[in-house]
Structure formats: C-alpha cells, structure tokens
Amino acid sequence: MASAPQAQHPANDDDLSDGMPRPGIGIAGGMQGAQISPAPRAGSNEAQMRARPDGARLPGHADPSIASPALLPLVARAMAGEACLGCPAVEAAFRWLLDEGRLIGDLGELVTALAAQLTENGFPLLRFFISVRTLHPQIAATGYAWSRGDSQAKRVARDHAVLSSPEFLSSPLRLLYQGDEPEIRRRLTGPLARFDFPILEDMKKAGATDYAIFAIRLPGGVRSSVSITTDAPDGFLDVQIDAFRTLIPLLSLVIEAREWAYIARSLMHVYLGQGAGQAVLSGQIQRGDARTIAAAIWYCDLRNFTQMSNELPRDLVIATLNDYFDTIAKPVVERGGEILKFIGDAMLAIFPMDDDLDRDNKIRIALDAAIGALDGLRELNELRAATGQAPLHVGIGLHAGSVSYGNIGAAHGEDARLDFTVIGPAVNLATRLEGLCPMLDQPLLASRQFASVCGSRLKFLGTHPVRGFAEPQDVFGLPD
C-alpha cells in the first residue's frame, strides 16, 4: 500500500492527535476491553469480501482457516507464527506482546516499542496513543503519545480539573468512560467524513485521514483507552481495524499490570513518603521490621490550632491546614527531605544521612528547609492579612541522631494496621524541643547535636529542662 507524504504536525501534536489536552484542555484518548467481533465463516462470500464504510468492497483474508478468535486457540497459533488475525503487522505485534512486550515495565517504553513493531511491519500509523486513568490525589490520567518520527513516546499527565473541562466533555473519551461506546471510528476525508468531536478537526489539520479509539475495560469499568490514527490516503483498511481490535484484550492485560504497579507506587509515596513507600514495596512489611538510620529530624506544629478548629467552619479549617502544609512542606521536599506523616496540625520529616561525612551536610540542609518554611509562612500570612484572616504561627524542633525506621502497629490474624515511621529518643527530643517554642517565644529550636555544625546561624538560648529527659538540654534558636 502506497504511503502518504510525511504530515506536518502542529507544535504540540503529542496531545492533539489522540485527544490528550493541551494546557487547560481536556483529555481525549481512553480505554476498555474491546468487544471482539466474530470473523466471517470460512468459505463464505463475506469471508472473501469485506464492506468498507464508503460502500466499496475489499478482498477478505485468503486463509480459509481464519475463524473467530473466541473459537480458536489464538495465542498458540500466534506464537506458532500462523496467520490468524488477517493482518501480518498486527500478528507480529501480537506475538511480540506475548513474548517480549509484556516484560517492559515502563508504559512509555511499551508504547514506543509497540508502535515500532506495528509500523516496521507495515501498519500505517501516524499516531499511537494510550491513555490511562489512575488513582492519584492530583493526577487524573496519564497519556503516552507516539507520532511518526518520534524516538520516544511523550508522557502527558492531567489533573482532575480536566475531567470537568468543556474539551473533555465534548471528546470521544467521555463516551468511552461512560460506557456508551466500546469504540469510536471516524473517517476524516471523503464523503463519510465526520467531525462530531472538536478534536477531529485538529487531527485533520495534522494530516490524518482516519481515526479509531478503543476502550479498555479494567476492574471497575473503563479506565483506559488506545487510539490509532493514519494518514494513508484511503484510511485504515477494515481488515486492519478488525485485527487491531483483536489486539485490545491482550494489550489490556499488559496495561492493567502496569497500572496497578503505578498505583501501588504512587499511593505508597503519597501516603508514606518516597523512602518509606519504596521500603514497603521492597518487602519491608512485617510488623517489627525496622532498621537503624542516622537522620536530621524535623518536627513542626501549628500554634492555637485547637481554638481555630473550634471557632472556624470545617471547610475553612481544612483549607487553612492545606495552605499551611503546602507552605511548610515545600522547602522540605525541595531539599530532599522525606515527610513521614502529618499528625493533625503537626508534620514529621527526616533528612537521612548516608554516612558520617554526610552528617554535617544534611543538618545544614534541614536548617535551610526550616528557615525556608518560616519565610514561606510570612508570605502566607501577608496574603491572609489581605483577606482579613489571622496570622498562622508555628514551632519547629530540630535534632540529629539515630532512629529506628520501620513498621509498628496492630495485627490480628489476617487483619493489620501498620504505620511506617521513625521512633526513638532522637525523635522524642525533636518533638519536645518544638514544645518549648511557645515558652521561649521562638519559632525554631534546635539541640546542641544539631547546632554544633551550624556556626553563627544558631545562637545559644540556655539550658532548659525537657519533659521526659532526666538531664536539662542545651537549646539553640535563630539569632535576632
């Protein structure tokens, strides 16, 4: 089949052709386990001639052994190299997915490699796009878009706001997610061309002649999609669409495995922190599993939160906490700290030390993060003052030492509720120092172990009794 000249793509063709939105534009490219249409009965007229949407008749597959994939051991035949899908390019991709493709862990790399398998065997792809809805507090969907000439598929992530955007609501993906359609195909040239979705106009401008999107149904409903676009003069042949449709169930299994792995990693990182999440995914899951690490310990608490939560409306309290945590957490994360938990209005974070040589560096970084948090809080209070809201005040306790890093909690038979955290005297001292902040009228207090490497950045504030510790502690704060 003759190939069309290379299309000229718009600057952001990675999200136009398959419906992934540009900034501020909705997602379009979706998923579901496509319905497999039974193949015509071998030897029938319909098996030899297939109808085109424009009314023309195309020769069917000549192999009389072709029958419904639901009736044949499709996988065994494909792995044996037998023709069984009616399209050599898709058959080659099918075998590759079963053998090598399913072992590729990164979905972007899978999209790139699968597109290469298809195109190198003659499938006329202009665009190939996989969109996966995911379980993440900020990201609604992640898409991987490959265009002809790309060496790597482009990743595009969209937040939850996109799902209510006009562009998404008028996109093919919305119909797939609602379950209204298992697949949508649109000719973009000729008498049967349809442009009932705004995104199709953009595809035509990019040189596309035919577009098809297939829903991929995963547990819980339609959660993903795969779409294909061509610039072949006559669009896709029906035998190519039929063959590609048969590829969808296998592709859905591969995508599902990667989606759940991504969800597990994302939720572990969101709720436990990156280091703790990785430790759990690596197998540190039994109650009592722990190891000793050295770390700079960072503990902060919001002043007068009890009074605030008693007096303000619930939604305003939650909004205030989110603003506060955004401000306090940002400098910690930016400097490589690991936030372990939020405890009401308090936050516990650590800066793990690789070795003795790393100790001084991590202490200084932790102090930078604390000063950055206080600077950010001043800016937040200026915004709050402009809207008539009371300022927020915080106390930060800093210490450095060894901690036990691992699992604690309750376990009853197969039921368990565990927490991955740090415990030990070093953590206790950091929290007690924070508790001294209102007594000494200081926003930040540090131990001698922490302050010993900070020089003039911290000043000695005297020796003070600390609850739970037999000996008074030397306490340091910010200079005036």
Image: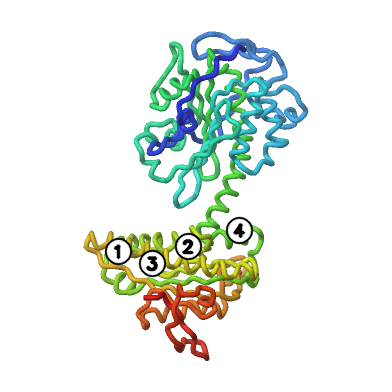
Residue positioned most to the bottom:
470
Mark 2: give few (<14), some (14-19) or many (20+) Cα within 10 Å.
many
Residue placed under numbered mark 3 in the picture? 374
Provide the secondary structure element on which disc 2 rests.
Answer: helix
Q: In this view, does 276 lie to the left or right of 465?
A: right
On residue 278, the disc is: 4
Q: In this view, does 393 lie to the left or right of 370?
A: left
Mark 1: give few (<14), some (14-19) or many (20+) Cα within 10 Å.
some
Residue positioned most to the front:
456
Mark 4: give few (<14), some (14-19) or many (20+) Cα within 10 Å.
some
Residue 271 rendering spot, x and y as whole percentages: 51, 60
On residue 332, the disc is: 2
Residue depicted at 46% across the width and 65% down the height: 369
Residue depicted at 51% across the width and 79% down the height: 428
Residue placed under numbered mark 1 in the picture? 381
Residue 440 rendering spot, x and y as whole percentages: 37, 82
Q: Give the quarter of the figure containing the N terminus.
A: top right
Indicate the quadrant where residue 217 lies: top right
When the figure is inspected, residue 434 is found, relative to residue 381, above or below; the finding is: below
Indicate the quadrant where residue 329 lies: bottom left
The disc, 4 or 3, on the residue closer to the chain's N-terminal end is 4
> Could you give the CA–CA distance between mark 2 and mark 1, rounded to whole angstroms?
19 Å
**What's under tag 3, amino acid-wise?**
Leu
The disc, 2 or 1, on the residue closer to the chain's N-terminal end is 2
